[in-house]
Image (cartoon, rainbow, N blue to C red):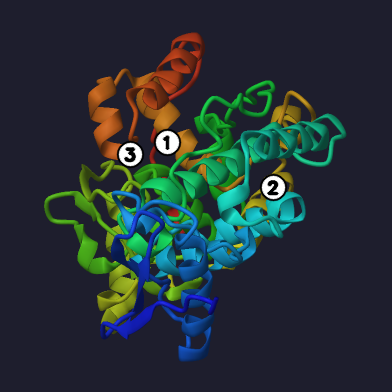
Amino acid sequence: MSKPKGQLRWWGKTYSVRVRFADGSRKWVPLPEGLSHTEAVARAQEIADAARRRSAPADTRVIALPSETLDEWVKRWTAMRERIGYRTVRDDRSRYKTHIQAVLGTRPVGAITTEDIEILRDALDEKVQGGKIAWTTAQLVWSAVKSMFKAARLSKHRELRVRRDDPTQGVAPPDRGAVKAKQFLFPSEFLQLVSCDEVPLQWRRMFVTTTYLMLRASELEALGWDDLDLEHGIAHIHRSVVRTNRTQDGETKSQRARRLAIEPTLVPLLHAMQKEAGARRVGRVLDPMPPWYDLAKGLRVYLIAAGITRPELLARGPTRRWITFHDLRATGITWMAVRGDDPLKIRQRVGHEHVATTERYIRVAEELRPGFGTVFPELPRGLLPG
């Protein structure tokens, strides 16, 4: 008996193969994008051979290629997400390579079972217990695993749908650990930092802008003069720098633009910086910015240079974490909460997706309000052009 080959056709974007199933029906089965003709012929023969041993499914998109490993499928999955513009593709690839590939990478994607997923989960727990990774990292890896197998079953991109079930369903996630509190600066500490002449002027202005506007680093770098209406005191936050190409702008993390009132004490500095920029005022407000991987370390170095050595800011351990550049955004949010701003106003201003995120700052503020100091204080004249 000759080996079934199926009828192969090119549809202008991808190949499909028409095969006969055990119940006598003939249906077209889409093949993954990006296959060469030789690869498509080989895959078509595999599918035709598998089809004759089963009845035709209602949806032929869920027919897994028998020889496709998870490694191969993940390459297609991440490539698709990259084309669409997902911001987490780089992290997805890194987490897969570091934590998932060794356990599941060579397994056929259609043959991975719930037990395999449990083995992966147990491996993540062992890494956490051994101090190799933080529990938050394990949770991020788990989230990637869930996204992968959800796409393998339900993706609207037909070439990714290779399973009729999701093996992660019903599997308990990795263990969670202690939640470490976000760090923040008191107003007096902040003024001490941005008044210190040993801290470069560009860094001090960067600390002020991200704190008073409560911006993420990617949003701060993308901030342009055309995003600021200084006459009316309004900032339009609608873009962020793409992590893999810092010359390219993309959407904000929440994929929602927001307009916010600029703190009055920040306006004089922005006016002065705009005047100083002169002809460059059509570009970015802070150009150039240091590399992102230097921001957190630079902040800690300059805190020490300014004489700010509160242990809570610089300690690192199982229940405490040292301050990072992102905590300057947390500082501004905490200040708003201490001031008593409406929670919905805070959420809208900073772009929180969930109310619960904003409520954490409210609870901290309620404990800190007495004796906290004046928030968003007047800025030192040393920040202005000479």
User: At 41% from the left edge and 56% from the top edge, which residue is drawn?
Assistant: 22
- Select label 3 or label 1 by which is in front: 3
Q: Which residue is mark 3?
A: 350
What distance separates the C-alpha of mark 3 from that of mark 2?
Answer: 24 Å
Residue 353: which quarter of the image? top left
Q: Using residue 127 as the reference point, say whether residue 36 is left or right of it.
A: left
Q: Earlier in the sequence, mark 2 or mark 1?
A: 2
User: Looking at the image, which residue sits at the far front?
Assistant: 1
Secondary structure of residue under mark 3: helix
Q: Name the quadrant of the N terminus.
A: bottom right
Residue 184 in percent (x, y) is at 55, 32
User: Mark 3, residues whose alpha carbon is within 10 Å: few (<14), some, or many (≥20)?
Assistant: many
From this viewpoint, which residue is outermost toward the bottom? 37
Q: Which residue is mark 2?
A: 300
- Are the residues flagged by discs 3 and 1 in contact, CB closer than 8 Å? yes
Three-letter amino acid code at the position of disc 1: Gly
